[in-house]
Amino acid sequence: MNTHISPSTFISATTGETVSFNAWHHSQMTMREAIDLMDAGGHPYVSPNVPQGFDTVLGYFFSCYGWFPAMYDDEEGNAMQRGSGMKEYDDWCAKYARMLGLEVKKVEAPTALKVHGIMTLNAYPEALLEIRLTEMG
């Protein structure tokens, strides 16, 4: 059973992680759907079924900085729009993947973007994402 710390925070019984629903509210999921997704190891900012060795820009940022995508999301789904840095990061990865002849895969968008009409994202080799993140730091 999940343990509620506050009305908007709980500890997942499956993963033991502390979860804030504030990071989920733009996904338009019900609280029950959010709990079920988290207990299954998912998150509204992480695309399902991404091939091993690949990740999306949003998923990679979430894995490195759990607060980052939610910080830039709003009711219009701006986590992948220009101005947040996510779209520019994706453009950089697309450019260098083409230049280097790296494989890019189309994957299903995460729940938080699907509700805003963004249905697919590019998944890049994790090494390319790491290079870009290091370059930005």
Image: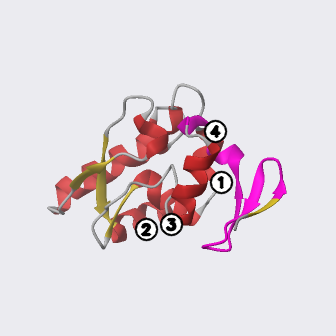
- Residue at 43% x, 68% y is 130
Q: Secondary structure at mark 2?
A: helix
Q: Are marks 4 and 2 in contact (CB under 8 Å)?
A: no
**Disc 3 to disc 1, how far (Cα)?**
17 Å
Between marks 4 and 2 in the image, the one whose residue lies nearer the viewer: 4
Between marks 2 and 1 in the image, the one whose residue lies nearer the viewer: 1
Q: Amino acid at mark 4?
A: His
Q: Residue 38: percent from the left, percent from the top?
A: 56, 60
- Magenta segment: 5-28
Q: Residues within 10 Å of mark 1 (few under 14, many from 20)?
A: few
Q: Residues within 10 Å of mark 4 (few under 14, many from 20)?
A: some
Specify whether residue 22 is painted magenta: yes
Residue that label 3 marks: 41
Between marks 3 and 1 in the image, the one whose residue lies nearer the viewer: 3
Q: Mark 3 or 1 closer to N-term?
A: 3
- Position of residue 15 relative to residue 30, above or below, is below
- Residue at 54% x, 39% y is 27
Q: Secondary structure at mark 3?
A: loop
98, 110: nearer the viewer: 110
Q: Which of the 4 image quarters holds residue 70?
A: top right
Residue 50 relative to residue 36: left or right: left
Is residue 137 shown to the viewer in this render? no
Residue that label 2 marks: 130
Between marks 1 and 4 in the image, the one whose residue lies nearer the viewer: 4
Q: Which label belongs to residue 25?
A: 4
Q: Which of the 4 image quarters holds residue 67?
A: bottom right
Q: Mark 4 or 2 closer to N-term?
A: 4
Q: Mark 3 or 2 closer to N-term?
A: 3
Q: Amino acid at mark 2?
A: Glu
Residue that label 1 marks: 67
